[in-house]
Image (cartoon, rainbow, N blue to C red):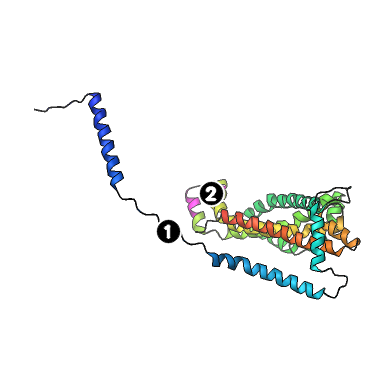
Amino acid sequence: MVSAVFHSPREAALEAAAAAKAAAVVVAAKPVEPRAPRPPFDWRGLWLQIIPPVLGLALMVGIWALLTMKGGAFPTPAATFEAAVKLFADPFYSKGPNDQGIGWNILFSLQRVALGFGLAALVGIPLGFMIGRFDFLNRMLSPLISLLKPVSPLAWLPIGLLVFKSANPAAIWTIFICSIWPMVVNTAVGVQRVPQDYLNVARVLNLSEWKVMTRILFPAVLPYMLTGVRLSVGTAWLVIVAAEMLTGGVGIGFWVWDEWNNLNVQHIIIAIFVIGIVGLALEQLLMAVARRFSFDD
């Protein structure tokens, strides 16, 4: 004979509350494990990162000061620093198209670099994928790339002036044609180094070419592609300074040339440091992006 015990809703609620209270008592009675001590701050590592660059910069300034101690046409570090303070006190002044602050000149140069570099990325990365993926296209275009890649950037500038009849698009064209090659070559090499087993699996699964590109090739090629992008942006920033010296207008390159015509050597030295700092910042930014999307542990 089977008997069943039925509880009223009130009794069930009291039993649930009692069980919860007992569980809370057990949890409270359980000893709390002490937190692991926080590791001490690595002051030695911080100093090793800061001291060497500071010493290198101090050495350069010291040698500069020694060489200019007796005077001459080359300015001293102190005079250059004073000129930099005055220059950056108002970097965005505008007194006409040919007299603008260094801040505007840097922004105009970065705008040209962004346009030329962006167009190069839109063309170069897909082209690199196709060259690495299809052997016939690789054999057809590799000799052409090897022929055009070593050409000096300034050799392309007259072609741009001839075609576009204007200095600004000619400078953008020069950036485009000079910064496209690292992206094409690195992307193609990355595609060619994808293990054949991956492609065999895609063939067995009968994946479309689009899925092969996006699901298999892109993740494997991304580190190579970002390396090409980092090299290209350095080339683009290098080229724009030389191109603007010849085309004129507004830009950091033209500003350097204009300061030379005014025999203002202090501003030229300041521009050299500014160009180097901006180029370093662009490279560090892309290196951070590369580390963000890296698949390495």
Q: Residue furthest left?
A: 1
Is residue 21 placed above or below 230 in the rendered structure? above
Is residue 106 placed above or below 20 in the rendered structure? below
Q: Residues within 10 Å of mark 2 (few under 14, many from 20)?
A: few
Image coordinates for residue 54, horizontal then vertical, percent: 67, 67
Residue closest to the eye, 17 or 218: 17
Residue closest to the eye, 83 or 145: 83
Q: Secondary structure at mark 1?
A: loop
| Badge 2 or badge 1: first in the primary sequence | 1
Image coordinates for residue 47, horizontal then vertical, percent: 59, 67
**Disc number placed over residue 116 in the picture, else none:** none
Q: Which residues are magenta?
A: 200-209
Q: Is residue 17 left or right of residue 181?
A: left
At 57% from the left and 64% from the top, the residue drawn is 46
Magenta: predominant secondary structure element? helix
Residue closest to the eye, 132 or 19: 19
Q: Which residue is mark 1?
A: 37
Res 59 → quadrant: bottom right
Residue closest to the eye, 164 or 192: 164
At 48% from the left and 53% from the top, the residue drawn is 201
Q: Amino acid at mark 2?
A: Arg
Q: Secondary structure at mark 2?
A: helix
Q: Is residue 287 left or right of residue 151?
A: left
Q: Amino acid at mark 1?
A: Pro
Q: Is residue 13 left or right of residue 155?
A: left
In magenta segment, residue 203: yes
In magenta segment, residue 64: no
Q: Is residue 75 left or right of residue 193?
A: right
Q: Residue furthest right?
A: 262
**Disc number placed over residue 215 in the picture, else none:** 2
User: Would you say residue 120 is visible in this rendering?
Assistant: yes
Res 21 → quadrant: top left
